[in-house]
Image (cartoon, rainbow, N blue to C red):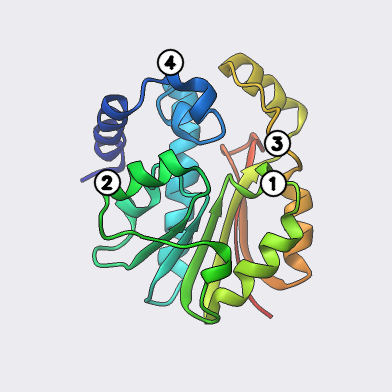
């Protein structure tokens, strides 16, 4: 299935599960309103981040299990290579129940349950910036990487263009505690940068990057 066909299929299925207008307070901190945005250009940027992260996984990650931190609806699981063992961390109980209902093979874990050296890839996609204590989360997810494992990270730049686009798209962003650049500086103290790009091309609204053990 092509990326475009996948996006329209997933949008249709997400619309059957979530009523953005009615549930906005519950799901605003997830990527779901962006994936389902009626402005297709705005929605395309959200999906582009996900596919960029998946490409980094295919390029740099060894075979093995993955962890999705802040998974929400678990969209990442649908574009990983077939047979990939998929675990997730999701603090919202409703989101976690919905994810496992539609993906019963997904394994839910808390940060405290993560096994050292277990994962070929850990994803933190547009999630770390929602937390007050990024350092403690990073201290817990980095040891879960295997010796050749990678951390794949994405988040908003919070620059003027991003803030304007967010306002036009109708999102408040009040739940963003920091920027992706601040997060990347924290990650750089623990891991080595392998690859990084901004999206969309020529408009640095989001940073997507891949990191490995030093």
Residue 176 image label: 3
Q: Position of residue 38 (x, y in %)?
A: 41, 16
The disc, 2 or 3, on the residue closer to the chain's N-terminal end is: 2
Q: Secondary structure at mark 2?
A: helix
Residue 87: assigned label = none
Q: Earlier in the sequence, mark 1 or mark 4?
A: 4
Q: Position of residue 164 (x, y in %)?
A: 69, 20
Mark 1 residue element = loop
Q: Residues within 10 Å of mark 3 (few under 14, many from 20)?
A: some
- Residue designated by label 4: 22
- 60 relative to 151 in the view: left or right: left
At 68% from the left and 29% from the top, the residue drawn is 162
Q: Nearer the viewer, mark 1 or mark 2?
A: 2
Of the residues tagged 3 and 4, which is closer to the observer? 4
Q: CA distance from mark 1 to mark 4?
A: 25 Å
Q: Is residue 48 left or right of residue 131?
A: left
**Image-quadrant location for residue 190:** bottom right
Quote the CA–CA distance across marks 2 and 3. 28 Å
Quarter of the figure with residue 166: top right
Residue positioned 75% across, 53% down in the render: 133
Residue 9 drawn above or below residue 89: above
Q: Residue at x 38, y 76 (%)?
A: 64
Q: Which residue is mark 1?
A: 131
Q: Earlier in the sequence, mark 3 or mark 4?
A: 4
Report the number of numbered marks.
4
């Amino acid at each position: 299935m092509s990326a475009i066909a996948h996006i329209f299929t997933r949008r249709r299925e997400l619309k059957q599960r979530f009523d953005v207008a009615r549930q906005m307070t519950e799901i605003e901190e997830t990527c779901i309103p962006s994936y389902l945005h009626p402005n297709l250009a705005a929605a395309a940027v959200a999906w582009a981040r996900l596919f960029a992260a998946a490409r980094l996984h295919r390029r740099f990650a060894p075979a093995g299990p993955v962890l999705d931190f802040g998974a929400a609806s678990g969209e990442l699981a649908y574009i990983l290579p077939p047979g990939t063992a998929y675990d997730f961390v999701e603090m919202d109980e409703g989101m976690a129940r919905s994810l496992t209902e539609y993906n019963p093979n997904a394994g839910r874990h808390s940060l405290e349950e993560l096994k050292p050296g277990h994962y070929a890839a850990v994803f933190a996609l547009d999630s770390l910036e929602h937390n007050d204590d990024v350092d403690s989360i990073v201290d817990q997810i980095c040891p879960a990487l295997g010796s050749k494992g990678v951390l794949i990270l994405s988040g908003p730049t919070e620059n003027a263009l991003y803030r304007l686009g967010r306002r036009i798209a109708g999102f408040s962003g009040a739940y963003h505690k920091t920027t992706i650049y601040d997060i990347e500086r924290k990650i750089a103290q623990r891991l080595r940068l392998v690859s990084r790009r901004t999206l969309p091309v020529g408009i640095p609204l989001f940073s997507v990057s891949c990191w490995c053990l030093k």
